[in-house]
Amino acid sequence: MKTTIKFHRLERGLKQSDLADLVNVRRETIGRLEQGQYCPSLRLAMDLAKVFDTSVEELFSFEDEDMDTDTASATARTARTAR
């Protein structure tokens, strides 16, 4: 998962702890979100979007995961047809 949270946070001059306080999570959660290591709940994603006055889609991108799924599907199809 890719995210633009850090970009938006820095653009507004917020520390991770400041943002965490605004959305009622721990600072560590913000750090993990920024690194793409944590998939937020819908509520948290919406709260973050509200803080930054943007959309959830602007904050989070799942393109890499979709590409991995497509690649895996294509590989499986190729393996089946090679038999």
Image (cartoon, rainbow, N blue to C red):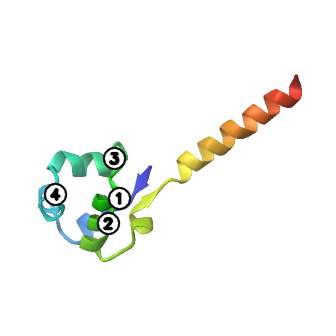
Residue 58 appears at what percent x and percent y?
Answer: 42, 68
Foreground: disc 4 or disc 1? 1
Q: Earlier in the sequence, mark 4 or mark 2?
A: 4
Q: Which amino acid, by three-letter code, is at mark 1?
A: Leu
State the residue at coordinates (82%, 28%). 80
Question: What's the residue type where badge 2 is placed?
Answer: Met
Sequence-first tag of 1 and 3? 3
Is the C-beta separation of discs 2 and 1 under 8 Å? yes
Q: Which residue is mark 2?
A: 46
Tag 4: amino acid = Ala
The image position of residue 18, as x and y in percent, is: 12, 61
- Return the mark for residue 35: 3
Mark 2: few/some/many CA within 10 Å (<14, 14-19, 20+) = some
Tell me the distance, in whole angstroms, between the alpha carbons under discs 2 and 3: 18 Å
Horizontally, is 72 left or right of 7 in the view? right
The disc label shown at residue 20, or none:
4
